[in-house]
Amino acid sequence: MPDQFRELLAVNRDADQPGWRIVLFYHSHPEHDAYFSATDRAQALWGDPPDAEPAYPGVAWVVVSVYDRSVRDVQAYAWNEGARDFDALPFAVV
């Protein structure tokens, strides 16, 4: 099993404990902008379009744009039930 799946499994186990919950996932787009790509969307959904649902309802997905080893932008996205797609959220890194 790849390390990323082991890590996700461990996070899910931790989130099942009382007082814990997953509120966001993040990843970087090296040398690309902080957009929610088709791959990001596919990995965030469970099932096949048009009936796909969020794999983690209520969880935000944060994308970090990194150019030349420096963060250029950070964007957050969340599922919009009405649009049946992910929308950008107001988000600031403080």
Image: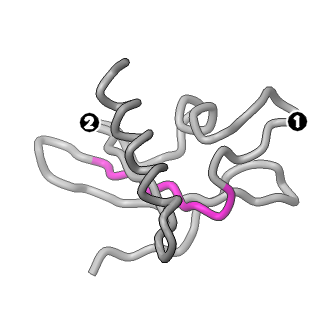
- Quarter-of-image position of residue 1: top left
Residue behind mark 2: 31
Residue behind mark 1: 51
Against 89, residue 66 (above or below) is above
Classify residue 69 as left or right of residue 45.
left
Against 9, residue 19 (above or below) is below
Amino acid identity at mark 2: Glu
| Crowd tier of the residue under label 2, counting other residues whose Cα lies within 10 Å: few below 14, some 14–19, many 20 or above | some
* Residue 67 shown in magenta: no
User: Could you give the CA–CA distance between mark 2 and mark 1, rounded to whole angstroms?
Assistant: 33 Å
Instruction: Determine the residue positioned at 67% across, 52% down.
Output: 86
- Sequence-earlier tag: 2 or 1: 2
Check the picture and name the quadrant holding the C terminus.
bottom left
* Residue 63 shown in magenta: yes
Against 30, residue 94 (above or below) is below
Give the magenta-colored segment's residue range: 57-65
Amino acid identity at mark 1: Asp
